[in-house]
Amino acid sequence: MRAEIISIGTEILMGEILDTNANFMAQRLPAMGIDLFFMHQIGDNRDRLVELIQTAVGRSDVVILTGGLGPTEDDVTRDAIAESVGEEPYVVPELEAHLRNFFERRGGRMPEQNVKQATIIPSGESIPNPRGTAPGWWVEKDGAIIIAMPGPPAEMTGMWENDIAPRLTARSDGGVLISRTLKTTGLGESMLDELLGDLRFAEDPTVGVYHKADGVHVRLASKAMYEDVARDRIAPVEQQIRSMLGDAIWGADEDTFQDAVAGLLKDRGMSIAVMESCTGGLLASTITDVPGASGYFRGGLVTYTAEAKIQYGVDAAIIADHGVVSNETAAAMAGAVRRQFDADIGVGITGVAGPEPHGGQPVGAVCLGIETAGESYATGYTFAQTRAAIKARAVTSALTLIRRATLGELMTGSSGVYRRL
């Protein structure tokens, strides 16, 4: 079956809210054996929506709409579907009574404009909404299925799980799409593409490479009639890729980078402490998001000024000679916090998150330092993004260095300042 998603709402089209509904369904349709070929965003305009629905029905087996089922004038989804299939909506007395009872149970009176939520067309049926007043529609006409669900995500997901997903699964023409995602660090997208070679052109499973915030992901996907058949096709290719990439793979599927780093620290019995400047405690927060962090996280300091860095053990001469944002200062911060908390690994982060340059360094300049009992390493980055994104990328880069330190690979591919202690 071929599916198409239409997200309705001017607020979505204008970028005022994120379209999480389409993302939710796009992740689930392939596992049901349904191919998703198109996704659209459209404003609250009846004529344009009618045109889009008619186009979608002409090329897809299932057209799923979200939004526009409210009681106001700009909620046009029902009327657009009715016009698209050439039918007239009518009020269902049982639905109207249900809506009136809904309001009465809450001590109110139903506004008359809400009656439009109790309508249906001859080729459709109403789908219950356990979390709101807007029922959905399931319409079948000329071999196509048109589904309309409410826009609020809580209402949409409830309707999807209770009614829509089971019905679509039962109607699917068979097959499931199974995917497996391997997550890597330390390799650029182009380098990874080159390493994978001919695997990139395989058809079953397909192999895709995608740049993400926590590294580059390799996605393997196979479609088959049965889940175990698809998994059997993926398994040998996954093993081949794991052999190629080795420790560059830090996790798979739902694993998070901080979970992977936490696992390494626990497995090796190593402790860590951090001194942060431009990230303002975000690294410490990220590390301690993982349950059980008290087993390896000794503590953290936010030293936002040069004076604070000096107060907690950074040599004033290093800052004077090299500047607050420098590899030398980052390395000194790592050493100072390691000694302060008697940790196996110390991490220092200093940089310019913006919006203005500082100390002769541009916005986005970040220096990371890391120290263990026998090694010290520092390196610099330039992240040309927003303040929040710069801080997030600095934390991800710091986790990468922590991982390298736990694996004893600080010197591998080093482009910064490395020294043995």
Image: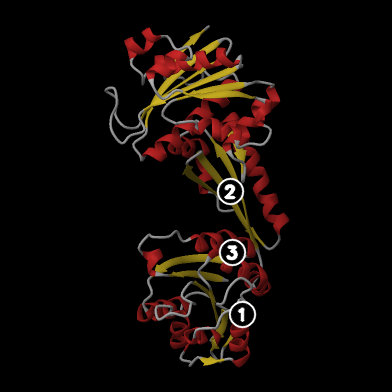
Which amino acid, mark 3? Leu
Of marks 3 and 2, the one in the foreground: 3
Q: Earlier in the sequence, mark 2 or mark 1?
A: 1
- Which of the 4 quarters of the picture holds residue 367? top left
Callout count: 3
- Which of the 4 quarters of the picture holds residue 191? top left
Which amino acid, mark 1? Phe
Which amino acid, mark 2? Leu
Residue drawn at 40 percent across, 36 percent down: 390
Which of the labelled discs sits on residue 220, or is there none? 2
Q: Which quarter shows the N terminus?
A: bottom right
Q: Label 1 belongs to which residue? A: 102
Asked whether 261 or 281 is in front, the reply is: 281
Residue drawn at 54 percent across, 61 percent down: 26
Asked whether 157 or 55 is in front, the reply is: 157
Dot 2, how many residues are within 10 Å of its Cα: few (below 14), some (14-19), or many (20+)? many
Q: Is residue 77 above or below residue 35?
A: below
* x and y, in percent, of residue 381 in the image: 38, 27
Q: Label 3 belongs to which residue? A: 29
Q: Is residue 111 above or below residue 63?
A: below
Is 32 on the left or on the right of 151, as rendered? right
Q: Is residue 375 above or below residue 298?
A: above
Q: CA distance from mark 3 to mark 2?
A: 17 Å
Of marks 2 and 1, the one in the foreground: 1
Of marks 1 and 3, the one in the foreground: 1
* x and y, in percent, of residue 117 in the image: 53, 83
Asked whether 304 or 403 is in front, the reply is: 304
